[in-house]
Image (tube, rainbow, N blue to C red):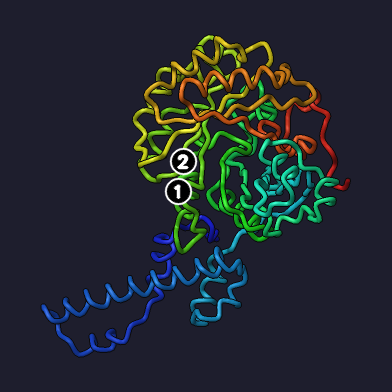
Amino acid sequence: MIYFQSLNKNDLADLLLPLGRVKEERDLRDLPEGDERNSLLKKIEQKKIKQAMMRAKQIYHWVYQRYVTDWDQMTDLAKEIREWMKANVTIYRLNETYAKQSLDGTFKFLWQLHDQKTIESVIIPAALREKIGDEVVATLEDGKRYSGIETEKAGLDNDLNEDSWARLTACISSQVGCAMACKFCLTGVQGLDRSLEAHEIVTQVLELRMRAPITNIVFMGMGEPLHNVKNIIKACQIMLDEDGMNFSKRKVTVSTSGLVPGIEELYKHTDVSLAISLNSSTDEQRSQIMPVNKKWPIAELLDACRKVPLGTHRRITFEYVMLKDFNDTIEDAHRVARLLKGIPSKVNLIPFNEHSGADFKRPTDKTVLDFQRILLKQGYTTTVRVSRGRDILAACGQLRSLFGTARGTEKHRDFQPVNE
C-alpha cells in the first residue's frame, strides 16, 4: 500500500501516468512503423504527462487545501481514477490519543502511529490581531502569559479558529525519541526509537490544519530533523508546493543540533529556513551538554552555516538555551557575538524550561535581559523566546512519547494520563 502523504506531486503524477487516456491513441491503429507513428507516439506521451500532472494537482488540492480524505468525494476525478486510488493509495491519518490546552492557548497533541508508537506535536498561537485595550496588547507583546481569565475579561476565548490569532505555529516531530542526548532536553531521555517516514511528518501538519489555520511550521518537536534528512526533504517539498500545503519557504523552519552533512544535504534539495541550536560559546562547554559537538565542533558547524545559500534579507536563527550558572554569563554573550560575526543571523534566547529530574535551572529574568542587551549592542537582532505551554510540558525541550516507548522516565514523573 502506498501512503498518499509520502508522494510529492511528481511522484503522484508518475503513478497516474499509466492510467491516462487520450483520443490520439485511436489513430495509432492504422499507422505503420515510421516517422509519422513515432511523432504521434511522442505527442501522446506528452499529452499523458500533462494529463497526469493535472490530475495530481487536482488531488493535491482536494487533500491539502480542501482537507478531503475520502476518494469518493473527489467528484471531478473520473470514477476509474478514484477506484484505482482507493485500491492502491491510502490517505494516512494519525490517531489522536491525547490533546490538552495550556492556560496561554497552546495545544499539545499526542498521536499514535500505525505501530502503536507515539509522538507529540504542538500548536502555538501568538500575536493577537485585534487591539483589546493597550494593557492587554502590551502584555502579549512583552511575552507575558495571556491567561484564560484575562482572555475571558477581554471578551475572547482560546479557540484556535478565532481570527484574533495572527500566527499559529505548528511545532512538529521528525522522530520517535531522539539520539542526540542533549542534557537539557526531555525528549533525549528516551533515546531514539525510530525515524518518522515522510507521510508521518506531513500528516502531523495536515491533522493540525484540519483543526486550526496553521501559518508557520517549525521542525522543533521530538527528534533531530537532519538525522532523518531524506524524509524531511520530501516533507518540505510537499509543504512548499503551491498546489499542496502552499507554505512560504520563510514560514517553514528546520532546526538542528548541528549535523553538518545534513545541512549540506538539506540545501541541495529545498530552500526552507534554518535554525541552529548553538547553546554554548565554547567547544568545551557545548560538548558537555550536546554530544554532537564532539563530532562537529562549533567552528565546523559555523563554517557550514556560512556556506548556506541564503537569499536576500534571509538569516539563520541561532537558538541559545540559557542554563543558570552554566552558559548565561556576560562573557558567554560576548563570545557568542564574536562567533557569529559575518553570518547573516538572529539570536533567539530560550530560558531553560524546567521539568522534574532536570540537572539545570532557569536563569533569572535579569540575567537573560543582560545577555540580550549585549548581543543587541553588537548589532544582532536578539529575541527572548516566550516559552508557551510550559504548564502542559509543551514548551521547547519538553516533548516526549509519554506512553509505550519512553525510556528513563523514572526521573521524570510530571506527565498526565490520557484520560485526564
Secondary structure under badge 1? helix
> Mark 1 = which residue?
249
Quarter occupied by residue 220: top right
Is 413 left or right of 263, judged from the image as shown?
A: right
- Spatial separation of the CA atoms under disc 2 and disc 1: 6 Å
Q: Is residue 13 above or below residue 160?
A: below
Q: Is residue 375 left or right of residue 304?
A: right
Horizontal and vertical percent position of residue 232:
49, 44
Q: Position of residue 252 (x, y in %)?
A: 51, 46
Q: Residue most toward the left? A: 35
Q: Which residue is mark 2?
A: 273
Q: Name the one closer to the observer, 229 or 29.
A: 229
* Residue at 72% over, 19% down: 364
Q: What kind of residue is marked 2?
A: Ser
Residue 380 rendering spot, x and y as whole percentages: 48, 26
- Which quadrant of the figure has residue 193? top right
Tell me: 107 left or right of 34: right
Q: Residue at x 73, y 51 (%)?
A: 132
Query: Hey, what amino acid is under mark 1?
Result: Lys
Quadrant where the N terminus is found in the figure: bottom right
Say which label, 2 or 1, has the lower sequence index.
Answer: 1
